[in-house]
Image (cartoon, grey):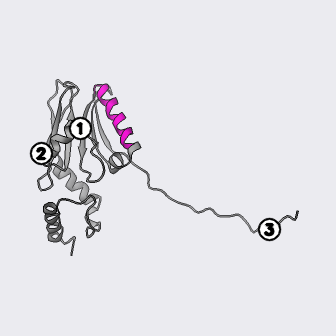
Amino acid sequence: GAELCFPVTGLTEPIRVFLGEEIERWLEIRDTTGRLITVLELLSPTNKLESDERERYRRKRRAFISGGVNLVEIDLVRQGAWIFQDGLQSVLQQAGACYGVCVFRAARPAEREVYPIRLRERLPAIRVPLRPSDADVVVDLQPLIDQCHERGRYHLLNYTGEIDPPFPPEEAAWVDGLLKGKGLRP
């Protein structure tokens, strides 16, 4: 058969694609020997939306708990499945919370501390466990999240669209009024 001959025109340039690095964020508290004492996890949409990532996160949680590490899970993500265990989910739902914080203390493995977070309320100040011989550290979430909101420039996002998943009508009206009051919706 006949062969096709293409003239050599030079090096073909690739298309360069720069991907943002996927960063997982958590805070570890270690003692002076380097032993892991407490982990604070700020849950991400990935933890809640993708079943493989959700299961990976649950394995990570089990590893911390079985390893005797205190764990503080902070869920401020509207989308996706609840990541907390069933009993904790029902407590949060009964409290009217759409978000929550769950604290596991290694010294009390059969118990969890749950902080319900309701939409119209200030974020709580939570107790973060350290070693059993140490006093808890109080972390006030509201100023931390406010600072993240400003530094991350989330106030520059487009807030004119509908929230997914939608809030119940009364909550949706309250959110709409709040966003309009801040000039983020027409």
Q: Residue at x 15, y 60 (%)?
A: 171
Dot placed on the residue nearer the N-terminal end, 2 or 3: 3
Q: Are marks 1 and 2 in contact (CB under 8 Å)?
A: no
Q: Judge from the rendering whether residue 112 lies leftward or rightward of residue 47; answer left or right.
A: left
Q: Which mark is residue 62?
A: none
Q: Judge from the rendering whether residue 123 lies leftward or rightward of residue 41; answer left or right.
A: left
Give the x, y percent position of residue 105: 21, 29
Q: Which residue is mark 2?
A: 95
Q: Judge from the rendering whether residue 114 lies leftward or rightward of residue 22; answer left or right.
A: left
- Residue 69, picture quadrant: top left
Distance (Cα) linking label 1 and label 2: 14 Å
Disc 1 marks which amino acid?
Asp
Query: What residue span does the magenta drawing correspond to?
Result: 53-68
Residue 147 seen from this side: yes
Q: Judge from the rendering whether residue 12 lies leftward or rightward of residue 140; answer left or right.
A: right
Q: Are marks 1 and 3 in contact (CB under 8 Å)?
A: no
Q: Tell me the element at label 1.
A: helix
Q: Tell me the element at label 3.
A: loop
Residue extending farthest to the right is 1
Q: Which mark is residue 86?
A: 1
Q: Which residue is mark 3?
A: 6
Q: Main secondary structure of the magenta part?
A: helix
Number of marks: 3
Disc 3 marks which amino acid?
Phe
